[in-house]
Amino acid sequence: MKAPASIYQTALYTILLCLLFLPLFEITTGFIKVKKLDGAYENKDTLPTFSVKNWLNGTYQFQKEKTVNDSFGFRNIYVRINNQVDYSLFNLPHANEIVGGQDGYLFETHYIDGYYGNDFLGTVSINRTIEKLKFINDTLAKLNKTLLLVITPSKALFYPEYLPDDPYTLRDSTNYYTYLRLLDKSPLHYIDFNNYFIANKYTSKYPLEPKNGIHWSMYGAAIAGDSLIKYIETVRHIHMPKAIWKNTIVRSDTGYDNDVETTMNLLFNLKSPLMAYPNIEFENDITKTKPNVMTVGDSYYWQLLSSYNIGHCFSPDSKFWYYFFKPDHSRLSRSEVKDEINKNDLIMILATAHNYINLGWGFIDTAYCMFKGTYPNHIKSTIPSERLAEIKEGIKTDNEWLQQIEISAKERGISLDSAININALWMIGQENNRKN
């Protein structure tokens, strides 16, 4: 005997009703442990502050709606399902400025622009920067100080065979190769890890660049750290603490080696070759020299600090100025640059190839004009507060961009607001460079 249709309808309605109320039940009781999303997402326990002013101007309602929308039950699972479907079916990663390449390799759009030469500054502009560096170098040499340029690798240059299909044509000139050509003709000290990594791509025992990350691999960073120390010893005529490689652990990618994959918030882990993680200690020899080092650089230096612990080889007074910013998000002033140079033996500018569009992030102009006794244009100018506020608001409303910034903030030990401000200032700097 067949059951009446109404029984099936009732059962279906009951199931649908349960499914509708399941998210509310989960957020109320928390009976299922849901994995948190990586990146910047609202805490469901954080509610907007109520006030008459916020209510009348609509701010409270907007923040309340956003908080509820970002914290409903099972939201994290739904986000991961959506991200997994988009990536698996359409090769569309949900991470800011990240694109999927061939065979699942992930790239950042800036690296691709640098590879094709879409951001080429022109030989005249690059030569002008080289001339300023030569003047700074000559001045520092008279003070028994050393200027060192460190070119870190570009994933696009290292893995061009895995780049996504793009409508771009490879230009004859790029910032990286033009800088390299002019540096070869100059007296400047520089070390090019990009070329070194490419030359050892197929002979290295372990991957020098990750598949699911954007920086050099943690193993590659350690290799670079060893080479960098040896180079500094040569140019400074000193002996620094020696690194002792105790062992190397080979396992699935983690940390910086899958930093991009983590921000994509997928359901399943991406495939990756086995990666190497050296266990390194440094000799404790008080007869060895630890130079005072001032570093102006990008995020690649964080890996030298964490993967290789390069700070152990430098004086405790050595400092790292990330994108030439201070912790309060402002640039170093002329007097501060003078004080830093006076305190340090080695001034190092470290940047990946695609960041040579804005090499030094203002440090070169500041140091050059300080030694020359003139003032660069960017010191006279002021940052447009309206544009700064506009970019910061854009960052806060872009979850994918925001989540990458939060990861960076955690790595650097600064607040999310501070990291947002730094990124907004960097965007303004990029806009000014394009105008000039």
Image: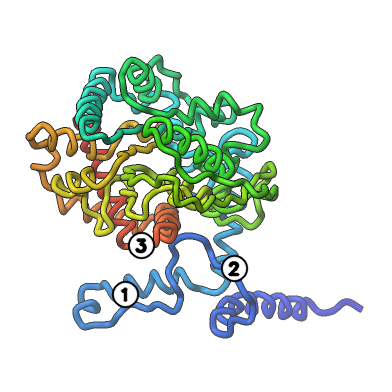
**Percent of width and height locating residue 22:** 61, 78
Q: Circle 1 — which element?
A: helix
Density class for disc 3 (Cα within 10 Å; few <14, some 14-19, many ≥20) is some
**Percent of width and height locating residue 53:** 19, 79
Q: Residue 75: which quarter of the image?
A: bottom right
126 sits left or right of 79 in the view: left
Type of amino acid at the residue the image marks with label 2: Lys
- Mark 1 = which residue? 61
Inspect this view and state whether residue 170 appears.
yes
129 sits left or right of 116 in the view: left
Q: Number of numbered discs present?
A: 3
Type of amino acid at the residue the image marks with label 1: Gln
**Percent of width and height locating residue 151:** 41, 32
- Mark 3 = which residue? 414
Instruction: Tell which circle, 1 or 3, labels the residue nearer the N-terminal end.
Output: 1
Pick whichever, 153 or 370, lies toward us: 370
Instruction: Tell which circle, 3 or 2, labels the residue nearer the N-terminal end.
Output: 2
- Mark 2 = which residue? 35
Instruction: Tell which circle, 2 or 1, labels the residue nearer the N-terminal end.
Output: 2
- For the C terminus, the image quarter is top left
Q: Are marks 3 and 2 in contact (CB under 8 Å)?
A: no
